[in-house]
Each structure stands twice: as structure tokens, then as C-alpha cells.
Image: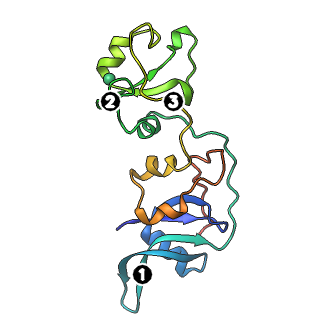
Amino acid sequence: MGRALVLNATYEPLCVVSARRALVLVLKHKAELVDQNGGMFRSERAAHPVPSVIRLKYFVKVPYRARASLSRRAVFVRDHFECQYCGSTAENVDHVIPRSRGGTHTWENVVAACKRCNTRKEDRLPKEAGMRLRSKPSVPRERIWIIVAVGRVDPKWEPYLVPLGAAARAEAAPSLAPA
Ligand SMILES: [Zn+2]
């Protein structure tokens, strides 16, 4: 059926909904159609383009979050499901500075790792284990919540996903006004 990106009245990406739900919002004049995926919804009386991007006509206040929330899946997405030590498929989340040694559970201290590297590293620092991180872990970009939510970014959404500020407004999935 497809999904649609929902933009705030300010064009800021808000959440992802089913294309059907997006159409309902458009038909109820709660949102305007910004882009469509080329398909049509047909009913007995009418045909409507299937939305791929809609924009709300009212402004939804998004609770400000300074950081994207840290989850196992989000770490995997940020690290492209690759072990940050050897590049093979990640299966674990590794604390760069082990928790047993005061390492924090933060974006800057967790990386995706394969089972082998994770086991090999044990409770050591990468340096102590003779291992090297391929990149320095950091707070992910804003769009990560979309990828975490739906697994991929529709190319039609790309123009609307330019980061709007330094702060990640991750997992911003505010409840829409009742349809
Ligand atoms: Zn590895």
C-alpha cells in the first residue's frame, strides 16, 4: 500500500503514516498533498492519487528532544548494520569503553559489532584489544527515526529530510489530531 511522510505546517518532517491514512487527512482537509507515488486509490465515486508526502494545515508542536533516543536497532541503522571494528555483519551492540570500566550507554560510546569482535574485545578498550574503530561514534542525524520506523527512506521524501537544526528531533511521532 505504501507509506507517506507527514510534514508539519512548517515543512518539518513529523512522522510516517500509511498512504491510506495520509489520504484520509487530505480528504478531511487536515493536510495538503505535496507529492504522490503515481498510484491511485479508487472508490466507487472517485479516484485519488496515493500520497507519498503530505503537509499538515495546522502546526503540531513537537516535544523538543536534544538527542535521538538510543536503541539497539537505531545503533544498527546508524552503523549500517556493519561491525564498526571489522565491517562484517553486526549482531551485537558494543560499549567502546566497557560499562564495567565506567563507559556510558550513550551514542558516543556504543557501536554495532559482530559477535566475533564483541567476544574478542571483552572488557577491554579497543586499543588494549588491538582493535580500531572504523569511525568515531556520534549522535545520528535527524532522519534516523524514519529509517528506524519504516526501514527505508522513500526517494520522494529526501528533499524534505534535510536536517533543520543541529539537534536531532528523533522519534518525533506526535499523535495527529483525531481524524
Ligand atoms: Zn567485527
User: Which quadrant of the figure has residue 38?
Assistant: bottom left
Q: Residue furthest bottom?
A: 45
Where does residue 154 sit, x and y in percent of width and height? 41, 61
Could you say which disc has been placed on residue 119 in the image? none
Where does residue 63 sit, x and y in percent of width and height? 69, 50
Q: Is residue 58 left or right of residue 50?
A: right
Where does residue 135 sit, x and y in percent of width and height? 46, 29
Residue linked to disc 3: 137
Disc 3 element: loop
Q: How is the image coloured?
A: rainbow
> What's the CA distance linking mark 3 and mark 2?
14 Å
Q: Return the residue nearer the eye: 3 or 135.
A: 135
Where does residue 145 sit, x and y in percent of width and height? 51, 48
Disc 2 element: loop
Mark 3 Cα within 10 Å, few/some/many (few <14, many 20+)? Answer: some
Q: Quadrant of ligand 1?
A: top left
Q: Is the CB–ligand 1 distance for label 3 below 8 Å?
A: no
The first of marks 3 and 2 along the sequence is: 2
Residue linked to disc 2: 87
Q: Is residue 146 left or right of residue 40?
A: right
Q: Assess whether mark 2 and mark 3 are in contact (beta carbons under 8 angstroms).
A: no
In the rendered structure, which amino acid carries the disc numbered 2? Answer: Gly
Residue at 37 percent across and 80 percent down: it is 41
Q: Is the CB–ligand 1 distance for label 2 below 8 Å?
A: yes
Mark 2 Cα within 10 Å, few/some/many (few <14, many 20+)? Answer: some
In the rendered structure, which amino acid carries the disc numbered 3? Answer: Pro
Residue linked to disc 1: 49
The quadrant of the rendering that contains the C terminus is bottom right
Disc 1 element: strand
Q: Assess whether mark 2 and mark 1 are in contact (beta carbons under 8 angstroms).
A: no
